[in-house]
Amino acid sequence: MKIHNVLGGILGAALLAHSAVANAETQTMIVAGGCFWCVESDFEAVEGVLKVESGYTGGHTKNPSYRQVSSKTTGHFEAAKITFDDELVSLAELSAYFWKTIDPTDATGQFCDKGSPYYTAMFYQDDVQKAVFEASLADVEHTKPFDEEIVTPLIKASDFYLAEDYHQDYYQKNPIRYRYYRSSCGRDSQIEKLWGDVASSHYH
């Protein structure tokens, strides 16, 4: 009964989100999933996603540099802003996909990257997005194939600062280095251990 209620909530939230942006061509979604190079490559592989930009958000330093964020003193997450066509892919679908690209049980970072810049989070930009994210979190808590607690928070969005140009589409500009980093960091092996055989692991 609870699962049916959760699914009903997801559908209702998705319909509400679609209604709210019926006249818009695109929406944006902001998430943190550890290394933003990996978040970019995962989401740019999804049909309907138009653009993914790496950046910093959630902290207290204005216009931070990568060096500042990496010092773990700014409070910023490495994050990604995902621009998508909501007629091709919904916010609810992208939210469900997000969970299976990360380890949401790790409160210390992601894979080989530890510390505050690599924490996971979903940043809602309005009440509609908050409802969709809450429904998605409730669903994954009921359906996850592991026992560990999900620790990824839902946070109200604040200023998003674009990362330096060399970080944008890093996986395309430096494919060999990117693949080595992703493999040696153990991202895909841990994701498959948690979630099983998922689509994101086959994009790389």
Image (cartoon, rainbow, N blue to C red):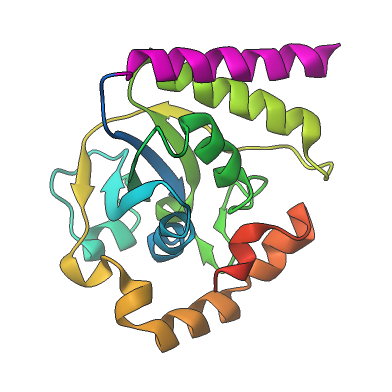
Numbered range of the magenta stretch: 1-22
Q: At x 53% / y 32%, what residue is drawn?
A: 153
Q: Is residue 145 left or right of residue 173?
A: right
The x, y position of residue 112, in whole percent, is 56, 69
Residue 74 in view of the camera: no
Q: At x 62% / y 28%, what residue is drawn?
A: 137
Q: Is residue 142 left or right of residue 117?
A: right
Vertical arrangement, residue 148 with respect to residue 193, above or below: above
The x, y position of residue 150, in whole percent, is 68, 37
Residue 139 in view of the camera: yes
Placement of the C terminus among the 4 image quadrants: bottom right
Nearer the observer, 197 or 102: 197
Question: Could you tell me how many numbered marks the image carries?
Answer: 0
Nearer the observer, 4 or 24: 24
Placement of the N terminus among the 4 image quadrants: top right
Report which quarter residue 152 is drawn in: top right
Residue 119 highlighted magenta (yes or no): no
Q: At x 34% / y 18%, what residue is drawn?
A: 126
Vertical arrangement, residue 5 with respect to residue 110, above or below: above
Q: Residue furthest left?
A: 63
Vertical arrangement, residue 128 with respect to residue 59, above or below: above
Q: At x 38% / y 48%, what residue is drawn?
A: 49
Q: Is residue 55 left or right of residue 142?
A: left
The x, y position of residue 156, in whole percent, is 37, 25
Report which quarter residue 2 is drawn in: top right
Q: Is residue 41 left or right of residue 57?
A: right
Chief SS of the magenta region: helix
The x, y position of residue 198, in whole percent, is 69, 57
Residue 10 highlighted magenta (yes or no): yes
